[in-house]
Image (tube, helix red, strand yellow):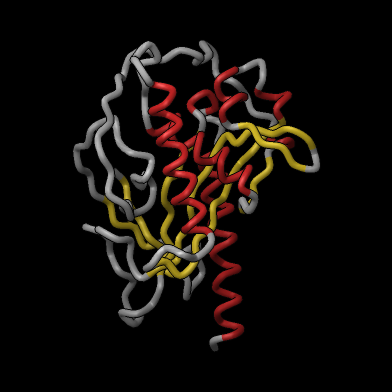
């Protein structure tokens, strides 16, 4: 697992990386924090799911029309619900013919949705600020590619129906709960909040399109705005 943090007191382009690798099961909770940044803030449980039975994956790589891609900070419950669905289908592999699998998926989505709302609303202890950043495409671009993705990760706004195809959380905090590794930036106080990325995911149907890079770039831009705001009000 690759990990890194970047301080909010300086330009986020100067990243301080700390790399570590550790074996882990391929089946983990959506609460787990994924590469390229830091460790998770919530406990996770292993799920009784299978690594087989993956369908709905195209044989050829789908090329994303970048002109239609929208990167934004999710605010509405519809956007957060779609992001929660994407995280569940990305971080877990389900055996579709298992008894009660749909109920199990629904339970996981609801749990992630409620936790995500709590973090974004600033109600989670230990987090100074959290932003859910999504990448979306028009439904018309995705519907022929994957029925499951189009159905589970769909939301609507003033511009019509869209599908969340990538998501991450940008967290400002002293440390992530249960943080086991990482390098604190030198020359700053122990009470200084850093920025972490967590729950980084891209729909498996759209891998190798640069969506992860675009999400991280957007997160850096948002983090820089947080720095400007704090330096303006707390010089």
Quarter of image, res 32: top left
- How many numbered marks appear? 0
Pick the front one: 17 or 113: 113
Up the image or down, 61 lies above or below 222; here it is above
Percent position (x, y) of residue 70?
A: 68, 43
Residue 191 location (% of width, % of height)? 34, 80
Image position, residue 71 (x, y; %): 64, 46
Query: Looking at the picture, does residue 48 appear above or below residue 157?
Result: above
Residue sitting nearer the eye, 79 or 56: 79
Residue drawn at x 28%, y 30% is: 47
| 180 to the left or right of 151 | left
Farthest residue to the left: give it: 23
> Is 35 in front, or is 25?
25
Residue drawn at point x = 64 percent, y = 28 percent: 64
In the rendered view of the protein, which quadrant contains the N terminus?
top left
Which image quadrant: the C terminus? bottom right
Taking depth in this image into account, of 83 and 180 the one nearest to the observer is: 83
| Residue farthest bottom in this picture | 235
Extreme-right residue of the structure: 159
Q: Residue at x 38, y 52 (%)?
A: 37
Q: Residue at x 38, y 67 (%)?
A: 125
Quarter location, residue 138: top right
Give coordinates of residue 108: x percent, y percent. Answer: 40, 36
């Amino acid at each position: 697992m690759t990990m890194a943090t970047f301080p909010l007191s300086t330009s986020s382009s100067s990243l301080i990386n700390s790399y570590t690798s550790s074996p882990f099961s391929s089946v983990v909770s959506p609460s787990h924090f994924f590469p390229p940044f830091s460790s998770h803030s919530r406990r996770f449980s292993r799920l009784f799911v299978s690594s087989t039975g993956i369908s709905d994956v195209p044989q050829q790589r789908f090329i994303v029309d970048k002109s239609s891609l929208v990167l934004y900070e999710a605010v509405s419950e519809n956007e957060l619900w779609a992001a929660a669905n994407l995280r569940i289908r990305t971080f877990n592999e389900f055996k579709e013919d298992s008894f009660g699998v749909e109920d199990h998926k629904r339970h996981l989505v609801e749990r992630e949705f409620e936790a995500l709302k709590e973090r974004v609303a600033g109600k989670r202890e230990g987090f100074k600020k959290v932003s859910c950043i999504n990448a979306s495409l028009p439904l018309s671009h995705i519907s022929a590619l994957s029925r499951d993705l189009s159905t589970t990760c769909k939301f609507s706004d003033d511009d019509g129906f869209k599908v969340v195809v990538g998501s991450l959380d940008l967290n400002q905090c002293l440390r992530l709960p249960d943080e086991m590794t990482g390098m604190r930036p030198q020359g700053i106080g122990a009470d200084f909040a850093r920025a972490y990325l967590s729950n980084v995911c891209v729909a498996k149907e759209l891998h190798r399109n640069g969506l992860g890079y675009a999400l991280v770039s957007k997160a850096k831009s948002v983090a820089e705005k947080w720095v400007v705001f704090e330096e303006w009000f707390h010089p």
